[in-house]
Image: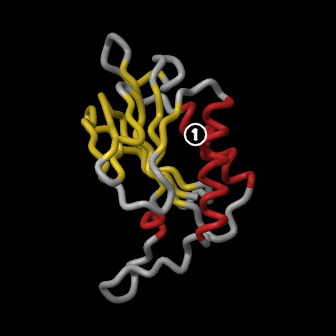
Amino acid sequence: MRAVVQRVNEASVTVEGSVVGSIERGLLVYLGAAQGDEADDVRYTVNKIAGLRVFPNDQGRMSSSVTEIGGAVLVVSQFTLLGDVRRGRRPSFDGAADPADAERLYLEVVDGLRAKGVPVETGTFRAMMLVQSSVDGPVTIQIDSRKLY
């Protein structure tokens, strides 16, 4: 499972002209499920997102998590995070989970974050979305449950 996490002042996702999810200060998370992802991958990803200390203290040092600042998380499904561009110019998505598994895993991550007390908004799974954000920093962190980076 892969996630790209951005610290934001605000973020929203629009589907077919309607805003379906929006947050103020918090984290924008693009989430992609890989073939073979299981409950351990979900737990790892949820714990990393909820615990990332990327919000600054009074000295400007990153020391607080989204839960500690009372922020929220906007989770957007994005299978393209599993794109493999090592061969040719067109990404291969063979490593991405099939849609049914990916949706289940996506919802498990959302539920896991909510279980930790994090307010969560979402995009719409398998929809074309317009994501808008005000990235703070910029701070962008990559998470891979298989610890590839």
Q: Dot 1 corresponds to which residue?
A: 48
Relative placement, left or right, of 81 versus 103 is left
Q: Quadrant of the N terminus?
A: bottom right
- Residue 51 lies in what quarter of the image? top right
> For the point 44% across and 76% down, which residue is it?
84
- Residue 65, compared with residue 106, is above or below; it is above
- Residue 42, compared with residue 68, is above or below; it is below
Kindly identify the amino acid type of the residue bearing the numbered disc 1.
Lys
Instruction: Residue 48 in the image: state x and y as whole percent.
Output: 58, 39
> For the point 62% across and 45% down, which residue is it?
109
- Residue 53, compared with residue 82, is above or below; it is above
- Residue 63, compared with residue 128, is above or below; it is above
> For the point 73% across and 59% down, which residue is it?
38
Instruction: Residue 47 in the image: state x and y as whole percent.
Output: 63, 37
Relative placement, left or right, of 31 versus 88 is right
Q: Nearer the viewer, residue 20 or 74?
A: 20
Task: Count residues near mark 1 (Cα–Cα under 10 Å), then give few for <14, some for 14-19, many for 20+.
Answer: some
Q: Nearer the viewer, residue 69 or 59?
A: 69
> For the point 64% across and 66% down, which residue is it?
100
Name the residue furthest right: 39
Instruction: Residue 75 in the image: state x and y as whole percent.
Output: 48, 44
Instruction: Residue 142 in the image: state x and y as whole percent.
Output: 44, 50
